[in-house]
Amino acid sequence: MHFLLLVGARPNFMKMAPVLAALKARGARTTLVHTGQHYDAKMSDVFFDELGLPAPDVHLNVGSGTHAEQTAKVMLALEPVLVRERPDVLVVAGDVNSTLAGALVAAKLLIPIAHVEAGLRSFDWAMPEEVNRVVVDRLSALLFTPSRDGDDNLRKEGAAEERIVFVGNAMIDSLLTHLPRARARDVHARLQLEPKKYALATLHRPSNVDSPEALLRVLTALSEVAAQLTVLLPVHPRTQARITQDPQAAALLARTPALRLCEPLGYLDFLALTDGARLVMTDSGGIQEETTALGVPCLTLRENTERPITVDVGTNQLTGSDPARVVPAARAILAGQVKASRIPELWDGHAGERMADALVRFVKARA
Ligand code: UD1
């Protein structure tokens, strides 16, 4: 029984680590392939180290590019690997370009695909990830959903019931495994932050950072919150490139020292800082889930989310990026008006095991 697991970008690593560990524990043969979509040490290597992921068996070294370039480069590099290895299943995770490319190649080679984090929908076709999610799900034999809304979305799109497997959230497996180590870190002292006396922010969505107007709006929102408490913003390379090119954004940051920028952080430091934050403001997908799992208030700086469970039962609120909405929402949280929340169903640390069991069953049934 042979599974090929494909990862490429930062948010893939914490979703795939629990699946890989659980497959190995069941004695399955695994091949880990890294596309190289993310390649900086701070975007990739540190996650492998801290999550205990083994070095990839195969590295495709594709790097950055336009959407078409990046997707095509992964497809060209992956095809001979899949032809050579002929795994029983290709396992892909999340919604990045590497995920899409992997699914397209495997589908044409008639290799069954399993999708970790299936069924999520923002219904916003301007997001490249929405295109990736819908296409990957359409091509996948096994659809591993993190929440019941995913099952409903897939049913509405006509997915057969036997393809849908509600397993819970693999990213939360990693969070629960590594939280004790994260809490033991000295990152608060290193950054001179006092737990519960700062906000943590992240920004990288093209809709927030790619145009100067959007970037200025969202940085203005963060700077106004920074008038209340220190806001730490670890800066994604995409965002850093935009800030560097934009004198207005750079000037705003220069006059707002309480909005503190730092380099991208490793998994454990970021988890520790999320856990210790009074408030998180983000346009990320996964951080909406991590804050819900930790019970930390989260403002999502987007107009929609593919993770509605974090709003329905978790700590998340959608505010968009307009300061007129973000700042009052932040102020309410700082005044103690915190939304009641609970942990979603099956976000219990065992999603990877459930996926490994389903994968083994799937291959046995086809033998
Ligand atoms: C990608 C995913 C996004 C995910 C995000 C997490 C797609 C379509 N997007 O967006 O869904 O939320 O990863 O981070 O797949 N760069 C570096 N070093 C790196 C990687 C990238 O400097 O290691 C720079 C390059 O200039 C690159 C830019 O960041 O052009 C964007 O990288 P890319 O992988 O294209 O998209 P992300 O914005 O990271």
Image (cartoon, rainbow, N blue to C red):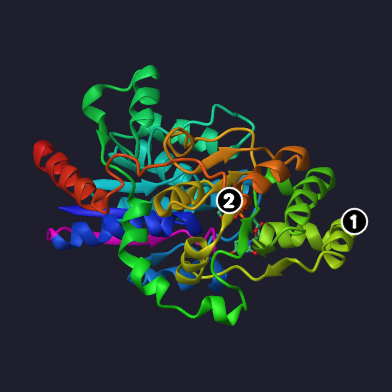
- In depth, the one of 267 and 34 nearer the eye is 267
Q: Which residue is mark 1?
A: 248
Q: Which mark is residue 70?
A: 2
Q: Which of pointers 1 and 2 lies earlier in the amino acid sequence?
A: 2
- In depth, the one of 67 and 156 nearer the eye is 156
Say if the magenta span includes residue 284: no
Q: Are marks 1 and 2 in contact (CB under 8 Å)?
A: no
On the rendered structure, is 182 left or right of 212?
left
On the rendered structure, is 35 left or right of 199?
left
Q: Looking at the picture, does residue 39 appear above or below residue 90?
A: below
Answer yes or no: is residue 319 visible: yes
- Three-letter residue code for mark 1: Gln
Residue under the image location 89 percent in, 62 percent down:
251
Whether label 2 lies within 8 Å of ligand 1 gets the answer yes
Q: Looking at the picture, does residue 260 appear above or below residue 239?
A: below
Q: Looking at the picture, does residue 104 appear above or below residue 278?
A: above
Residue under the image location 52 percent in, 46 percent down:
285
Residue 362: quadrant of the picture = top left
- Three-letter residue code for mark 2: Gln
Q: Which residues are magenta?
A: 26-39
